[in-house]
Amino acid sequence: MNAFGRRPRRVFLLSLALSLAANSFSGIGMAQARSLDYFVPVNFRNGQVEKLTAPTYSLADLKKLKHFLNEKGTLNLRRYSSGGHSAVTIGSDKSLESAISGLLIMHWDRDNIMQALAERQDGLNQWRSGLNASLKHHYRYRHRFTDIIDGKGDKKNQMQRPHIRYNAVSLDELSEPWGHAQNDALSFITFLLFFDALESNRSIEGEEALAYAVLLPHYLDAVKVEHDLEMGAWEDKRAVHASSLLVVLAALRQEYEYVTRHGTITAKIDGREYRVDEAFLRRLMGRVEKSLKTILPNEYVESDQSDTRADKSKVRKYDSALVNGLLLGSLSANGIISDKMTATILAGLEANLMGADGVARYPHDIWDGRTDRHDLKRGQEAQWCHVSPLMSVVYGDLYRRTGHKIYFEKQTEHFNRALSHINERYAIPEAYIVEPAGAKKVGAAAKGKVSVNWIADANEPLAWGQAALRMAFNGMEKSLAYSADLKKSHK
């Protein structure tokens, strides 16, 4: 029996809160620390995986665990000859049927770059074909950018915006109406393009890459990104999403760093020259930063009140999509916002969205992966499986930049939570949901209380979740190496 036990483990987070307050290194006050005085259960779905988890790990432990999961196919990712991918990784007849049934056989730019980031970390060369697939699609349909930039396109018409979901093999657009106004999805592409260029010390080359490098900043300028009512990562609410702005800022900072080293980027596209220089990027970043200061730690404070299908709220305080931008800041090892704000956001997600089987997207979320659920009560929102592994990465970066051990403990906790999501088929589903029509009264002895059955949703294995767990492994390895170096320096 490991430290988690054979029954659901209960993690007491008061010690974390008090440590944060006592050390004051994150800037969290005692009032907020007390808000973390709660228990968070963890349900392991696979007994064999649970046996391999521990409260602490060595590099050898991680290597053994990762090898085991690779043998079981848990981490296996797939790309098509086009370089495209599908949201559900196609590795079996069951996953193929699931992907077709849920229309998750399509390519999403955000999910694609998440997968590419994980592949790149693991030294898998197919990451580049994934990036190129997104670049190729957007070059083919570059008029989506230029029409908005020139004022010919209507930014309020989402089908006239650059499409962020399309055919995974042909890379062609789909005619199906979709909420394509997603500035974060487009910015993920720019982040990886320049992140790799900076790390590899190479220049951006090729008409597709150069076109994207100049068009996205001008497009973001044209839609007035800092005030843009777009759909966000969940594609379900028109608002000025902080989660999107964080990703935009992460991408622009990478491009800005590149321009400071290599000079102004110019590209001639369909007879017109586009330029991106330091001054332009500084102004654009400044507008985004100013907007974020008015929103964070909330997800949004300005939204379209006529858009009420999924969420009627004008303000959304907690949203796990905020982790996306924090992740990119962690990967670039310099953060996007202050450590204090990062810790505040993470604490808010833990206290308000984290459950035994994952992390909810936001309070009162009605989506269960396939349909809207109006039968759900607060606390019964779908619990998604990609969030804890990404939080583990963010906590790991905080640990390696500050040296504060409490962050490493939180990194390990979320790494173990990520492992708990692996189901009996050794797959990572998109989320765990309350079984439809599964709420039943458990009898008079329980005084009419209602019991619900949590099951994996139909979308498995989700490439985003697989990629997130791969990155969590990488983050743990980095932190263990950092800890070893720290010990040597203190000898």
Image (cartoon, rainbow, N blue to C red):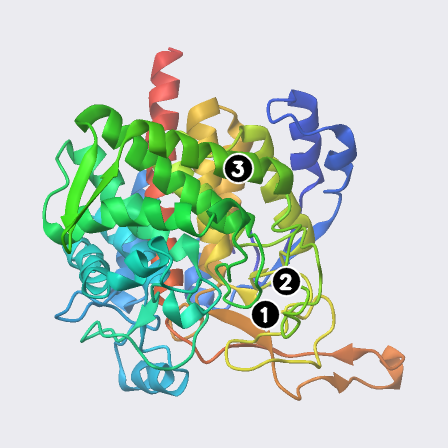
Q: Are marks 3 and 2 in contact (CB under 8 Å)?
A: no
Instruction: Give the alpha-carbon distance from disc 3 to disc 2, as whole Å.
Output: 40 Å
Query: Residue 434, how many percent across, how many down?
Result: 62, 77
Residue at position x 64%, y 21% in the image:
23
Instruction: Give the alpha-carbon distance from disc 1 to disc 3, as whole Å.
Output: 26 Å
Mark 1 Cα within 10 Å, few/some/many (few <14, many 20+)? many
Instruction: Give the alpha-carbon distance from disc 1 to disc 2, as whole Å.
Output: 24 Å
Name which residue type carries label 1.
Answer: Ala
Which residue position holds label 3?
409
Query: Residue 331, how many percent across, how many down?
Result: 35, 39
Which residue position holds label 1?
382
Q: Please tell me whether mark 1 or mark 2 is closer to you in this view.
A: 2
From the viewer's perspective, is 148 left or right of 342?
Answer: left
Question: Toward the viewer: 244 or 485?
Answer: 244
Mark 3 Cα within 10 Å, few/some/many (few <14, many 20+)? some
Query: Residue 140, how many percent across, how many down?
Result: 18, 65
Which residue position holds label 2?
304
Name which residue type carries label 2.
Answer: Asp
